[in-house]
């Protein structure tokens, strides 16, 4: 029954093979100089990578700036805790108080981003002097908020019978996610070299995962398969094209940026 329902409105075998080929080809393209080059290639597409706004571990530079590192590590903290709690399919929204707090997190990220951008343009502090700790912290808060808003939305669209529980059942849950995010922030801010590779790759995986999940929803809508999935196999049928979407998007943006730098003289501060 499940196979029949999803089979009529899902990518066929050849499309899945093409999607896998795109993902594998993109990974090979990015890894031509090693795994860290792959992470840097992803960062090149989705982040400005301004050195003074990026954490440096000895001679190693994070592939994402402080704010982007925080965003995607915060999102990974949210997804990880949802996995631990067994609520990856939860589609319910938290209480109004928690939702308001998550909106405050987003507002803090936007406010600090505007203040930091004005400083980049004018070289003068606007409301306060920007700092990587603030960028990292507000990025973490934004990532937590995005994961907690995105997961219920995804589940409401994707699954035939999503879990009606909220991902965050109370303040304790939010506190645990924030604790994990705080530990990640401390790890990044420590600049301890042995932590560089785990943090660098975790942040990039977080970025790729979010883009892939967005691509998954797009594939679901293209095939008009909303609320049909029931199993992990059904998820993979759409997640693989979602990964292909993320791969093509990253390659396209990176190519456009490289063209702008080579042809138009576009450049960002170091």
Image (cartoon, rainbow, N blue to C red):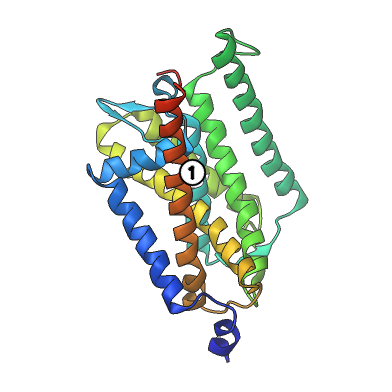
Q: Of all residues shown, which one is farthest toward the front?
A: 263
Q: Residue at x 44, y 21 (%)?
A: 265
Q: How many marks?
A: 1
* Horizontal side of residue 269 vs 108, given as left or right: left
Label 1: state its secondary structure: helix
Residue highlighted by disc 1 = 72
Residue 34 position in % (x across, y down): 22, 44
Which quarter shows the C terminus? top left
Q: Dividing the image into 4 quarters, which one contains the N terminus?
A: bottom right
- Identity of the residue furthest to the left in this view: 33
User: What's the residue at 48%, 78% (across, down)?
Assistant: 12
Residue 133 appears anywhere in the view: yes
Answer above or below: position of 213 versus 12: above
Who's the residue at 44% across and 18% down the image?
269
Residue 5 on image: x %, y %: 60, 86
Residue 125, image x and y in percent? Answer: 59, 10
Vertical side of 104 occupied by 23: above or below? below
Considering only vertical position in the picture, is 270 above or below 241? above
Q: Is residue 70 above or below residue 86?
A: above
Quarter occupied by residue 17: bottom left
Q: Residues within 10 Å of mark 1 (few under 14, many from 20)?
A: many
Task: Tell me residue 181's x, y (percent).
Answer: 49, 42
The residue located at (64%, 23%) in the rendering is 114
């Amino acid at each position: 029954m499940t196979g029949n329902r999803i089979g009529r409105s899902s990518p066929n075998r050849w499309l899945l093979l093409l999607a896998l080929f795109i993902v594998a080809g993109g990974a090979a393209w990015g890894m031509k100089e090693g795994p860290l080059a792959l992470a840097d290639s992803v960062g090149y597409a989705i982040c400005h990578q301004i050195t003074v706004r990026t954490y440096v571990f000895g001679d190693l530079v994070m592939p994402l700036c402080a704010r982007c590192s925080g965003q995607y590590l915060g999102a990974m903290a949210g997804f990880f805790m949802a996995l631990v709690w067994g609520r990856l399919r939860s589609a319910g929204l938290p209480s109004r108080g928690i939702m308001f707090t998550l909106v405050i997190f987003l507002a803090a990220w936007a406010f600090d981003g505007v203040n930091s951008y004005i400083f980049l343009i004018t070289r003068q502090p606007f409301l306060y002097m920007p700092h990587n700790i603030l960028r990292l912290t507000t990025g973490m808060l934004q990532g937590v908020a995005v994961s907690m808003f995105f997961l219920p939305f995804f589940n409401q669209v994707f699954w035939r019978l999503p879990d009606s529980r909220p991902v965050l059942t109370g303040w304790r849950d939010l506190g645990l996610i924030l604790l994990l995010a705080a530990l990640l922030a401390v790890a990044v801010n420590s600049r301890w070299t042995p932590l560089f590779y785990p943090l660098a790759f975790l942040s990039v995986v977080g970025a790729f995962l979010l883009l892939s999940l967005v691509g998954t929803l797009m594939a679901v809508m293209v095939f008009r398969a909303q609320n049909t999935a029931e199993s992990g196999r059904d998820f993979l049928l759409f997640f693989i094209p979602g990964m292909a979407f993320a791969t093509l998007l990253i390659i396209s943006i990176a190519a456009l940026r490289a063209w702008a730098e080579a042809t138009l003289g576009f450049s960002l501060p170091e």
